[in-house]
Image (cartoon, rainbow, N blue to C red):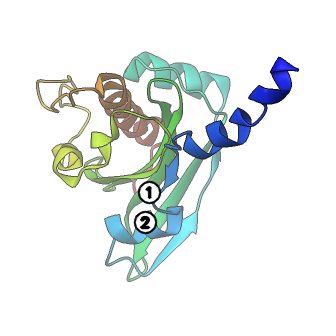
Amino acid sequence: MRSVHNLWLLPVAAIVSPVYAADYLTAEQAQKVIFSDAQSFEAKPVNLTSDQKDKIKSLSGVRQRWDTQKIWRAVKEGKTAGWFVVDEVIGKHEFITYGVGLTPEGHVVGVEIMSYRESYGGGVREASWRKNFVGKTLVDPFKLDEDVPNISGGTLSSRNVLDGVKRVLVIQKVLNLKE
């Protein structure tokens, strides 16, 4: 009989359980935020070979988890304005989905957090933190607390987004995404 009396707690627990997962932008919305003057976006998904994945890991120091990378070519006046890549990294426990805009020459145009599922470390969504990536190239150090600040309570999210952006730049290099 005792367990019957405690059954009423289940609905209450479900009501008060905090939900942290949130979707902020679709890929299309993030594309327009980063490449506001682009007239169109052409989907160019790439199926990576094991050799390409090995090279990406070797150059970035981070394993390429996915065989298919979501990539779009941003087009302005018939020319490549840049590349938009959707990627995911692990925060502390859950995936963070983000988009990165790159120039054809390999500079970061912008980073947008599209989905954040962690209970802490949401500071990676702040524009003031993400602006630290603008202009970065593979010659930059990509060191947490050196050229991109750490977020208190969000060290893993900060570090993993930082490593992910570097890996996206390496993907651009490995795939020779220019014009």
Identify the residue at horizontal 69%, vertical 34% (top origin). Answer: 9
Q: Does residue 99 appear in the picture of this structure?
A: yes
Q: Check the picture and name the quadrant holding the C terminus.
A: bottom left
Q: Which residue is mark 2?
A: 31
Q: Residue at x 18, y 31 (%)?
A: 140
For residue 105, above or below residue 16? below
Q: Position of residue 43 (x, y in %)?
A: 59, 63
Q: Nearer the viewer, residue 130 or 67?
A: 130
Q: What is the number of the mark on residue 84?
A: 1
Amino acid carrying label 1: it is: Phe
- Give the class, few, some or many, for how many residues have Cα within 10 Å of label 1's Cα (few <14, many ≥20): many
> Relative to the observer, which residue lies in front, 172 or 166?
166
Q: What distance separates the C-alpha of mark 2 from that of mark 1?
A: 7 Å
Seen at 31% across and 48% down, the residue is 125
Name above or below for residue 144 compared with residue 28: above
Other-residue count near label 2 (Cα within 10 Å), few / some / many at <14 / 14–19 / ≥20: many
Q: How many numbered marks, from 0 up?
A: 2
Which residue type carries mark 2? Answer: Gln
Where is residue 144? Give x, y as percent: 20, 24
- Identify the element where label 1 is drawn: strand
Asked whether the beta carbons under mark 2 and mark 1 sit within 8 Å of each other, the answer is yes
In the rendered structure, the answer to whether residue 40 lies left or right of residue 143 reads right
Circle nearer the viewer, 2 or 1? 2
Q: Is residue 23 above or below residue 140?
A: below
- Quadrant in which residue 32 is drawn: bottom left
Residue 33, above or below 89? below
Residue 47 seen in this snapshot? no
Q: Which mark is residue 150?
A: none
Disc 2 secondary structure class: helix
